[in-house]
Amino acid sequence: MSISTKIKKKIRKARSYKFLFEELVQRDFNQKYKRTILGMAWSILSPLLHLLVMKVVFTQFFGRGKNSLYYTTYLFSGNIIMSFYKEATKQGMSSLFKERKILQKINVPKYLFLLSKNVSAFVNFLLTLVVFFIFCFFDKIQFGPRMLLIVYPISTLLVMNIGIGMILSALYVFFRDIQYLYDVFLTLLGYLSAIFYHVEDFNNIMVQRAFLLNPVYVVIKYIRVVVIDCQIPSIEYHALCAFYALFYLAIGLWIYKRYNHEFVYYL
């Protein structure tokens, strides 16, 4: 069987699960906002409330950012990227376990449940992104064609979220303790992603470069360079974003392929 024939066969197989995938995404939305008065409005209100708290804390109490131009946009850009990463990966982590009853009865691709969680998180992120641009307007950010470049880091983050979600969901099947460890890790990651402070505050150049080991910070930095600094990141920076996305996706795909038949026995 030729490679093209295999690809076509996989595409036809994926299309056969289109209805199931759409139902999973719709169900995720319904479950998330079930019995809430504001519904999907919380997708916008939640990051706005976080932004308000952070802005008050770091400007009024700690005096940070008072003399910093575009500090609101600076905070908001880091906040929405971190929120998107947290929501996508945390929901992805439990995606297989929560659907164990279905997986034990029906043979369906396990990645569908993970992808539905990521699509749900991505739609919520797009809603907050609209609000982010409104804040940029009031913060007197200069708009231009360069703004289209933020599609690139967001796309790489989406791919990376899927890869990390695959890794976490597989680990969660075998080790339930991973959820508690990951919560601690997310707290640490939030502090290391320069959401409310500037990396340039560190005089040591090696410390500044060490932040590039954090893939979430890399995406946040890319967006800030484009939106706030009105510059286009280097080719090397583009490559770094792609590297993190493909690296984690490759590991996630390998784990799913390697342990695909063992998941059911541990669910």
Image: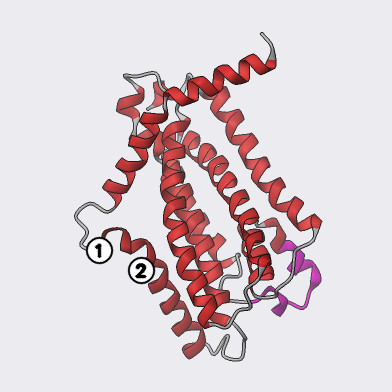
Q: Dividing the picture into quarters, in which one does residue 204 lie?
A: bottom right
Q: Dividing the picture into quarters, in which one does residue 6 lie?
A: top right
Q: Which mark is residue 121?
A: none
Residue drawn at (76%, 51%), measured in percent from left and top?
Answer: 239
Q: Earlier in the sequence, mark 2 or mark 1?
A: 1
Residue 132 part of the magenta-drawn span = no
Q: Position of residue 125 (x, y in %)?
A: 46, 57
Instruction: Say which residue label 1 marks.
Output: 38
Q: Are marks 2 and 1 in contact (CB under 8 Å)?
A: yes
Magenta span: helix, strand or loop, mainly? helix
Instruction: Say which residue label 2 marks.
Output: 45
Camera-side residue of 179 and 43:
43
Q: Quadrant location of the N terminus?
A: top right
Specify start and end residues of the magenta stretch as a single range.
198-210
Camera-side residue of 265 and 56:
56
In the picture provided, is 260 more to the left or to the right than 152? left
Residue drawn at (63%, 41%), measured in percent from left and top?
Answer: 248
Label 1, residues with CA under 10 Å away: few <14, some 14-19, many ≥20: few
Q: Dividing the picture into quarters, in which one does residue 177 lie?
A: top left
Distance in Å between CA atoms under marks 2 and 1: 9 Å
